[in-house]
Amino acid sequence: NSLNYKYEMPDVTLNHVYSISQISKNNLIWDEEWKRVIYTSNSIVIVEDLNEQKTQRFLSEGNDPIYSLEISINKKFLLAFTWQGHIDGTPMIYIWELSTLKKRAQISINQPILKSVKLSLNSNLLLVLSSEETEDSSVSVIGVWDFLEDYAECLCRSQMPFSIEEAIWNLQLTNLEFVTRSKTGYTFWKIDDLQLKYQEGATDIYSENPNGEKAVRLNEDVYITCMSNCFWALETALVIIGLSNGFVWIVDTRTNNLLCQVKLLDSELFFVTVN
């Protein structure tokens, strides 16, 4: 080919075909430890056990479509949640123990839209982002829930008068710090004595690049589209941020310091990660 890529084409045998719903954000995952394919089909979470050649199905409350599905960082729990409560207006969070597939929690959220749910590194806290949006206004609610097996309780919450798109834990730090993002910026949060305290990220970060160009500045045309953790940086608050113009930032959210800027694409970034 024109770019001189080298690749091999191994022999492939098709063994399974799955029908997966399109409404979901993350709707197909691989459970390496138990050799399972876990996916969603509308309001059903389906677990295909490839070792035992059996299928299990779990129906969401009220038949609401499952929006997102993921396995906790410590591989202990399976988490799923609905985007909206189409039947009763109440989005739901479901947590199963991964080894036994026994349901450990079912949590209802009062806001109409549930955007993001993340288990902490030790799976003892839940970071929940929900919102209520109209044509004229948007209100985001960030809640931190204490989660032990078969028990969940909201420890603290904060309400912001604008739309927040995503919330993630700072996994390399304690369970008491996390980062949120909107289109126009990011915010560093810390839980202190059951109170949520925050520091707004700098939206006018500048630094000199090797080629002499200044760093991208956020505005109406250039905005944040995605965010993820930097797993190589232990004991720091680094996140990688994707922008609508194809640039990627690596930012220390605690000090508001732009460490690196790279142009990846000529179009909008929807997902970016670092291994």
Image (cartoon, rainbow, N blue to C red):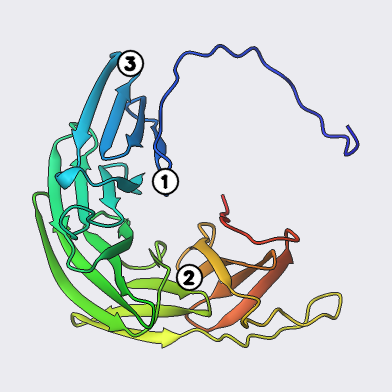
90 shown above or below 35:
below
Count neighbours of disc 1 (C-alpha within 10 A) and say few if under 14, some if 14 to 19, many if 20 or more: some
Cα gap from disc 3 to disc 2, whole angstroms: 40 Å
* Dot placed on the residue nearer the N-terminal end, 2 or 1: 1
- Tell me the quarter of the picture where residue 209 sits: bottom right
User: Is residue 148 visible in this depiction of the protein?
Assistant: no
Depth order, front residue of 217/244: 244
40 shown above or below 48:
below
Indicate the amino acid at tag 3.
Asn
- SS state under label 1: loop
- SS state under label 2: loop
Residue at 65%, 62% (x, y): give it.
Answer: 268
Residue at 54%, 57% (x, y): give it.
Answer: 232
In the picture as drawn, the residue positioned furthest to the front comes out as: 135
- Tell me the quarter of the picture where residue 55 sits: top left
Residue at 19%, 60% (x, y): give it.
Answer: 89
Indicate the amino acid at tag 2.
Thr
Cα gap from disc 1 to disc 3, whole angstroms: 24 Å
Depth order, front residue of 271/83: 83
* Dot placed on the residue nearer the N-terminal end, 3 or 2: 3
Find disc 2 in the rendering and name its residue.
236
- Residue 19 appears left or right of 7: left
* Dot placed on the residue nearer the N-terminal end, 1 or 3: 1
- SS state under label 3: loop
37 shown above or below 196:
above
Indicate the amino acid at tag 1.
Asn
User: Is residue 249 visible in this depiction of the protein?
Assistant: yes
Find disc 1 in the rendering and name its residue.
26
Find disc 3 in the rendering and name its residue.
51
Q: Position of residue 174 (x, y in %)?
A: 33, 68
Depth order, front residue of 227/82: 82
